[in-house]
Image (cartoon, rainbow, N blue to C red):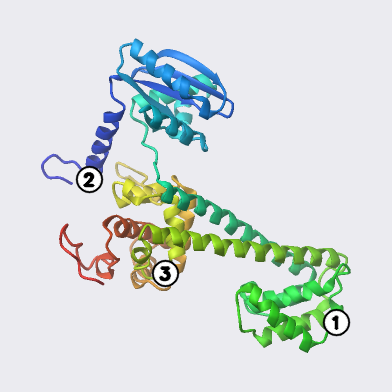
Amino acid sequence: MSKRNGLSRGDARRNARLIRMRGIVRHDRAILAIDLADTKQVLALCDHDSRVLARRTVRGRAWQLEEALRWGRATAIEHGFAGIVVGCEPTGHRWRIVAELCDRLGIDLVCVQPLLVGRAREQEDLTRDKSDPKDAVLIGRLVGQLRCYLPERTDQVWARLRQLGARRQALTTSASASRQQLRDLLECVWPAVLEAAAEPLDSATWRAAVQVALDRTGATGELAALGQVGYARFARQVARALARWGARRRCLRIVRAVWIAATSPTALATGVDTQRPGALERARLTLEDWHHTLGQLADVEQRMTGVLDQLDLTSLVCSIPGLSAVGAAAILAETGDLARFDSPRALVKHAGLCPRANESGAFAGTTRISGRGRPALRLAAWRATWGALAHNPVLAARHAHLTTRDHNQLTTAQARTALAAALLRWLWVVVTTRTPWQATIAAGQAAPAKKGVTAPAA
């Protein structure tokens, strides 16, 4: 808090942001608000008091709006304005097309959060009446009030990382679904095989052995037929199948346990007999899907780490103990270039991990996280924190402090959420300053080096 004028750092950042936005949404420019849709685009040209100067509806796709943008600029000049600024909601990919058209014409573009448009719709006449022409006016009003932001403009490298991150997220979801489906099917018709290893689905030997066993069932779904092959031959087949799962050495104890579960009458007595043939056939197909998805996932992760190498960020992000290159790439794929955030707190707010206070006067309610922002970024930060906690001494010490202190003790989940926010702050500092992570600074035992002074390595 400044002693001279009483402004906090948040006030200073907010004022600076408003000044930047006012430099774009100038009073001498009209506001061309666009409500984007698939085949119908509604435009409303407004002044800064949200008075509608002209309207237009385009029956076409977003990439057919260039002539309408020219019309909006010409109409604004006729009404005495120097030009226009375009405002829209970031709906899907369409806003990117409009941004490309605006860049060609030399027009500035700002975006308005759909949540704000929904709230403004309720405040308009309390009826929640929704239509494209009304939404266009609401967008123009919010832009005039500077309730807007500059959308992210990425280069080809950062855009590729974001696309790969979206692909990885979809593959991760698919792999998790296949894994859970396989467990459910085996629990129903072949539960004994799930006891062949302590963590069966994490064991490459178990996967290879189950794959060989299921391939031998055929259309009949009879596991007992595997006994005709013999254990020695079965073990050799498992050794050959093991390479498909990225492993070299087999665990003979697990191979023997799977063999017994497939050939022992006692083990086969459990499960639902009528469902066994069809469920085992489906389990074999699910296992193949899982293997294929894992291969695609490994390829995407390799491509993502290659993008980090292009950006010269691999060594920087990996200087944080416990944070892998893949985990950092997954986070950066959701954030984009971290230099676009004014502060590390802005990045934490973008992830929805910032505290949300509930206070008024003498009342102090429960503080929770905001939950706004990008859910995929929260998930990526949570996963990265989960893996880094066991290998990062600063995170481990902070987790122990938050969960064992006498005052305001947090649960394990709450502490991990706080650590995810701390990891994002570290990542912002490391990437934007291009300096490796230092344990003493991260733990608050030393102050960061001043600009122009090289900090000692951790």
Q: Is residue 382 among what the camera can see?
A: no
Q: Up-down: is 109 above or below 28? A: below
- Residue 232 versus residue 227: which sits nearer the camera? 232
Q: Amino acid at mark 2?
A: Arg
Q: Secondary structure at mark 2?
A: helix
**Residue visible at 26% across and 72% down?**
458
Q: Which residue is mark 1?
A: 265
Other residues around mark 3 within 10 Å, as few (<14) / some (14–19) / many (≥20) = many
User: x and y percent of residue 344 in the render?
Assistant: 31, 52
Can see residue 139?
yes
Label 3 close to label 2 by CB (< 8 Å): no
Spatial CA span between label 3 and label 1: 45 Å
As drawn, 2 above or below 179: above
Give 9 or 83, whichever is nearer the viewer. 83
Q: CA distance from mark 2 to mark 1?
A: 72 Å
Q: Residue at x 13, y 39 (%)?
A: 5
The amino acid on which the numbered mark 1 sits, given as a three-letter code, is: Pro
Q: Residue 216, position in %: x, y?
A: 82, 75
Q: Between disc 2 and disc 1, whose residue precedes? A: 2
Q: Secondary structure at mark 3?
A: loop
The extreme left residue here reads 4
- Considering depth in this image, is 35 or 129 the residue closer to the camera? 35
Classify residue 457 as left or right of residue 306: left
Quarter-wise, where is residue 267 in the image? bottom right
Type of the residue with mark 3: Leu
Left or right: 211, with 415 as reference point: right
Q: CA distance from mark 3 to mark 2?
A: 30 Å
Q: Where is mark 2, residue-wise?
A: 9
Provide the residue designation for mark 3.
389
- In terms of secondary structure, where does tag 1 sit? helix
